[in-house]
Image (cartoon, grey):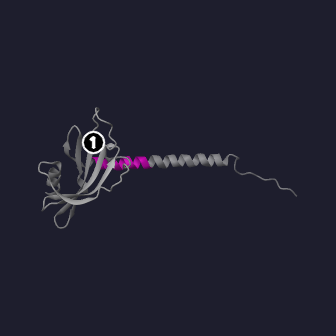
Amino acid sequence: MLFKKIHILPKNHQTTTLGLGFALLGIVCSFVSWVGVAHAQPLMTDLKPILDTKSHSIYIYQSSIKNLPPDWKKVWVLTNFYQDPSQAPLTVLSTRRNVLFDCRKNRFSTLALIKYAQANALGKPVLQTDSGFDLKERDVPEGSPMEIIKGLVCS
């Protein structure tokens, strides 16, 4: 007795499944992109301008200010660099820097420095060979943006 095979699914089942997989992948990627943009928006409203010049602008993330014992404060600082048409193209358009202030001694050090190829520290970080970790304490220069930031953070 011979039995005839009955195909429940169409012959192009693999093609249909593959197409459905790509459709789901597209939906997931769109959602992730939307969440990334929606997540970045509150961060942009959290920025407090410190300095704006022709070559760069500096901001701090107000919600990132942290109190540390005994008299230390930590804050994330955003720097955007502006392209000068007469110069070579910039590969780094922004940096985010985690700065630790010793409010009593008027000194600071850098805990992290992250470079970005897009403004406002958006997108993926630029490949770096160093961590940006520099615990060497430096005096806060008088009249510098760091002095303005220290005044806001340590007040």
- State which region is magenta: 32-44
Foreground pick, 152 / 112:
112
Label tally: 1
Q: Which x, y percent locates residue 33?
A: 42, 47
Say what secondary structure mark 1 lies in.
strand
Residue 44 is left or right of residue 107, and the answer is right
Q: Which x, y percent locates residue 56?
A: 24, 41
The three-letter amino acid code for the residue at tag 1 is Phe
Residue 21 vs 67, above or below: the answer is above
Most extreme residue toward the top is 86
Q: For the C terminus, give its image quadrant.
A: bottom left
Residue 80 is left or right of residue 139, and the answer is right
Q: Main secondary structure of the magenta part?
A: helix
Foreground pick, 75 / 86:
86
Q: Which x, y percent locates residue 125?
A: 36, 50
Q: Which residue is mark 1?
A: 81
